[in-house]
């Protein structure tokens, strides 16, 4: 990464004292050391599927990997595969292998294990700061600032108050509203009910961790971003199809991230998501996390399994 320091705090009103620290730091990503390069992670939020949230596993694996490198090198990429469903009833063990420690780059391999079998494998690459005159990035989309948008809870409440909402959407929105997720979201250009049948496989929303993290170690902000990056990501591939099909099974197969610039995960970032392709019971999604000042902080990619069944029309008789 280009710097070990997070950007200056331009959101002073959001910085609350340590007693309101983000649960992502104090609980979800706070691993218990068991031995050298061996850690145990516990669960905070479990989806309605009763499978472990993929972002939690990615974030915890990156925490474990980061503990095996020196403070002056920082993660620049990670590549992961989800190989078995996680069991929410038992903790996860994270085994770190110090694959290579070089002068500029270091690689760590992490295996997440439950019931004696790997459920997840990951390779993370770390780099010592190396300034370069070769620099460019895309331009951040022009969108309303988060201060002008409804929070997710208020938006869902507005949808549910509409008497014409389809039962399928009402059930789905109530499930979302019941989640205790340690993430805040504000959707850009939320669709009206009449637009839900004509969506493109694209979405944008402002996102940040709930609570206060502070500048601290940039590695921790990257771990929090890894957790955040998996939330609602694969669902982007379903947006054009959700009115025709019910999801029978949807899980991540792999997840990759590239970290470009320092950021604060407890500050609003724009998550720009799009799905360039879906087929063969799989969907591919790309994502970009932008700082509010227009700097591209993180890029993401994921492929997942998507199995659906046709919607059953309700009888009007």
Image (cartoon, helix red, strand yellow):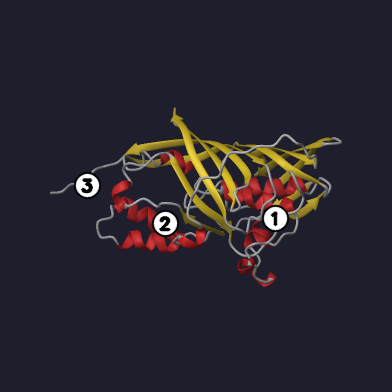
Front position in the image: 156 or 24 = 156
Q: Are dots 1 and 2 in contact, CB under 8 Å?
A: no
Left or right: residue 306 compared with residue 22? left
Residue 56 can be seen, yes or no: no
Q: Are dots 3 and 1 in contact, CB under 8 Å?
A: no
Residue 159 sits in quarter: bottom left
Front position in the image: 127 or 139 = 139
How many marks on residues? 3
Residue 95 sits in quarter: top right
Residue at left offset 15%, top offset 48%: 316
**Mark 3 residue crowding within 10 angstroms, few (<14) / some (14–19) / many (20+):** few
Q: Position of residue 296 (x, y in %)?
A: 62, 44
With respect to residue 123, does 32 lie above or below? below
Residue at left offset 33%, top offset 56%: 170
Secondary element at tag 1 = loop
Which residue is most to the front? 133
Q: Position of residue 23 (x, y in %)?
A: 63, 62
Q: Position of residue 182 (x, y in %)?
A: 57, 59
Residue at left offset 41%, top offset 51%: 189
Left or right: residue 227 compared with residue 305? right
Q: Which residue is mark 3?
A: 314
Q: Which residue is mark 1?
A: 7
Q: Which residue is mark 2?
A: 175
Q: CA distance from mark 1 to mark 2?
A: 35 Å
Secondary element at tag 3 = loop
Residue at left offset 45%, top offset 36%: 306
Q: CA distance from mark 3 to mark 2?
A: 21 Å
For the N terminus, the image quarter is top right
Point out the tag, 3 or 2, that comes first from the N-terminus: 2
Residue 255 sits in quarter: top right
Secondary element at tag 2 = helix
């Amino acid at each position: 990464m280009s710097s070990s320091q997070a950007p200056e705090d331009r959101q002073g009103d959001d910085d609350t004292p340590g007693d309101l620290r983000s649960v992502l730091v104090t609980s979800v990503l706070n691993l218990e050391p068991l031995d050298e390069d061996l850690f145990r992670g516990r669960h905070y939020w479990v989806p309605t599927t009763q499978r472990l949230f993929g972002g939690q596993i990615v974030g915890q694996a990156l925490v474990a990997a980061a503990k095996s490198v020196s403070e002056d090198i920082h993660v620049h990429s990670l590549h992961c595969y989800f190989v078995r469903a996680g069991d929410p009833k038992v903790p996860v063990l994270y085994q770190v292998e110090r694959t290579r420690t070089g002068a500029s780059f270091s690689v760590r391999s992490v295996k997440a294990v439950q019931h004696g079998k790997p459920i997840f494998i990951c390779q993370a690459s770390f780099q010592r700061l190396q300034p370069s005159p070769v620099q460019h990035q895309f331009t951040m989309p022009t969108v309303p600032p988060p201060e002008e948008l409804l929070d997710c809870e208020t938006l869902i409440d507005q949808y549910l108050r509409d008497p014409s909402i389809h039962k399928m959407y009402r059930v789905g929105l109530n499930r979302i509203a019941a989640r205790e997720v340690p993430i805040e979201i504000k959707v850009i250009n939320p669709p009206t009910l009449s637009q839900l049948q004509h969506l493109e496989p694209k979405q944008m929303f402002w996102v940040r961790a709930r609570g206060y993290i502070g500048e601290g170690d940039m590695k921790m902000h990257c771990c929090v971003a890894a957790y955040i990056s998996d939330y609602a990501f694969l669902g982007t591939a379903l947006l054009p199809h959700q009115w025709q099909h019910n999801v029978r099974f949807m899980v991540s197969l792999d997840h990759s991230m590239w970290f470009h610039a320092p950021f604060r995960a407890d500050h609003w970032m724009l998550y720009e998501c799009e799905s360039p392709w879906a087929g063969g019971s799989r969907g591919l999604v790309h994502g970009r996390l932008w700082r509010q000042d227009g700097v591209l902080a993180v890029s993401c990619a994921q492929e997942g399994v998507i199995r659906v069944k046709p919607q059953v029309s309700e009888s009007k008789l």
